[in-house]
Image: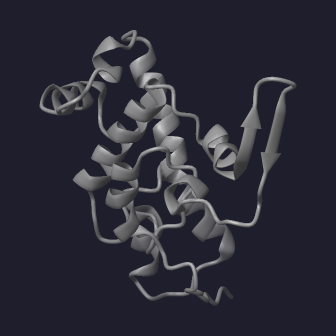
Amino acid sequence: MFYGTVDEATAYFAERLHETAWTDADPSDRPKALQAATRIIDTLNFKGDKHSAWLLFRDRKRHSLEQIHAAEAAQALEFPRDADTEVPEEIRIACFEIAHALLDGRDPELEVEALAITQQNYGSVQTSYSRAGSPLEHVANGVPSVMAWRLLRPFLRSSDEITFSRVS
């Protein structure tokens, strides 16, 4: 299960300039890339609640933690959220862009490590790392595509925002 479909992604990339990673990819790798992209997206901290949980909260009755967890588990992916019943187009496109970056060989783990390299020699093999600087925001969040990050950013909860819920 992933955001969008392989056919939607193919149609999207048919209109995108400088696109080869998707069209050159083995067709059996495309759904794998979309699945990996969906996992990356679903690790982020989004505003609001999964739609299935929102339906529970909107009646303003008290619900047990078990009921809330069951409602959240009923929806496999993070989207749709709140009153939305469809996955926003921006989320689907972000999924396509992340899948493209993954098919193009981008590895979020290696990108974080590469940002810390300050010196690298091949003769006598020497590599130096600096942990002083903070990585780019999208890389630090495991998103290998700046374009996808720009699409995802408005849906994210602020890092200094705290949400309290009372469950009785």
- Residue name at image x 65 percent, y 48 percent: 112
- Residue name at image x 64 percent, y 90 percent: 166
> In the picture, residue 152 is in which quadrant?
bottom left
Left/right of residue 10 with respect to residue 121 in the rendered view: left
- Residue name at image x 33 percent, y 51 percent: 147
The answer to whether one can see residue 76 in this image is no
> Percent x, y for residue 164?
61, 89
Q: Is residue 50 above or below residue 32?
A: below
Looking at the rendered image, the quarter that the C terminus falls into is: bottom right
Looking at the rendered image, the quarter that the N terminus falls into is: top left
> Percent x, y for residue 135?
61, 60
Q: Residue furthest front?
A: 123
Which one is in front, 13 or 38?
A: 13
Left/right of residue 139 with respect to residue 128 in the rendered view: left
Q: Residue furthest right?
A: 124
> Percent x, y for residue 66?
67, 68
> Percent x, y for residue 84?
28, 65
Q: Is residue 119 above or below residue 163?
A: above
> In the picture, residue 150 is in which quadrant?
bottom left
